[in-house]
Image: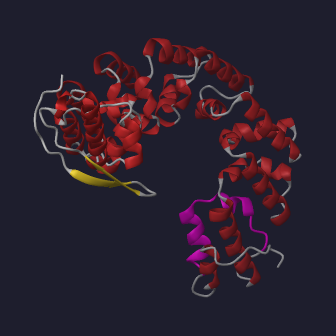
Amino acid sequence: MLRVFCKTLLITKAKDSTSSHGFFLRTISSAESTSGTLVSTNQKNLTIYYLVNSCGLSFKVATSMAQKIHIWTTERPDSVIELLRTNGLTNTHIAKLIKMYPRLLFYDPVKTLKPKIEFFQSLGFSRSDLAKFICSDKAILLSSLQNQIIPTLNFLKTFVLTNENLVSALKQYNRLVGYNVKKILEPHVATLRSYGVPDFNISKMIISVPKPLGLSILRFKDITAMVNRMGFDPNSRSFVVAIYSMSGLSKQSWERKREAFRSFGWSDDEFLLAFKVQSRIMLTSEKKLGKLMDFFVKDLHLKPSDVAKYPNLFLLSLERRIIPRCSVLQVLMSKGVIKKDVHIVSVLNSNKQSFEKRFVTRYEGETPEVIKAYEGEMGFLGFDR
């Protein structure tokens, strides 16, 4: 029950992204405190005031949240906010976290929140990475440390072996924290082992492409069986990467993209070859696939069957990588500095340092136009211009 007291609360103004809103909290006298409506109004205003001024939320968001939570005293919320700030969370992090789960303000900071934060710190999270991690998913601070977090991470560590690898996995996919060992993780591991996937490849999956581990048991089994039928080697990292690529698509999306490759003139064998070489091509949007193939065929005069041998091309950015590099080659060819028989696919696939050393810094003295071309200031007109 609200204690009868007299206390003057501050008059303040809060702003959201579109307009200003003024609100005030009146002095509650002994007589007024008997009015349930007045107490409720002041309590709601205190909630809004706190969410805006202490948590960094906009007035609009705070007003909406005040319908769901009620702050009667700021002692517990203040302690929660202080704990978060002490452990590296900025105002932006705190606003995001409280907006995601406002009831966190009422958790016991000493018994419930601090032990979890200290546990993640013990794994080797940097201060900045821990702040990002904590506010990336509400389940991280809400899950039971003893019954969920520790058992799950201990299970994962039997494969990844070190805390450093474990932190890499968690940064890659924060939802790993919430996966049940008996109901999800152990069945998935059993499925992989049934196809002969060795533990070192399971480790690679956990560290670099862990998202499929959150699939339902049936869906995970279906995808793994399909990858096996396609002829992927269970001893190769490509096996688990293929599972990852397929897990990001519904069956309908898979068929639409498969049809897109058929529209390029690819045979089933050419598609399978491309997918086995680079399974991530199926995560590229249909729009980008079409745009890239159009450029390869019309502007670079490559045959679709040739492109199928180099599927990594579909992972590159047309605007940021392919066109600037082609523009550099165009300048050098037009000046007669290099021959026109350059293997364009190899050039596009080469890393940044190698390309710059071979075609930019090597010639920028005698052909300064390569700098403009490389920085995207010159359009690509074709190698025959």
Q: Residue at x 26, y 29 (%)?
A: 106
Q: Residue at x 58, y 59 (%)?
A: 351
Check the picture and name the quadrant holding the N terminus: top left
Check the picture and name the quadrant holding the C terminus: bottom right
Magenta residues span: 340-363
How far across and how far down the image is residue 12, in percent?
26, 53
- Does residue 162 appear in the picture of this structure? no
Q: Residue at x 49, y 23 (%)?
A: 199
Res 225 → quadrant: top right
Front residue (pair 17, 337): 17
How far across and how far down the image is residue 281, in percent?
69, 43
- Does residue 83 appear in the picture of this structure? yes
Q: Is residue 48 magenta?
A: no
Main SS of residues in magenta: helix
How far across and how far down the image is residue 287, in percent?
75, 50
Res 251 → quadrant: top right
How far across and how far down the image is residue 313, in percent?
70, 53
Task: Determine whether 238 is above or below 158 in the image.
Answer: below
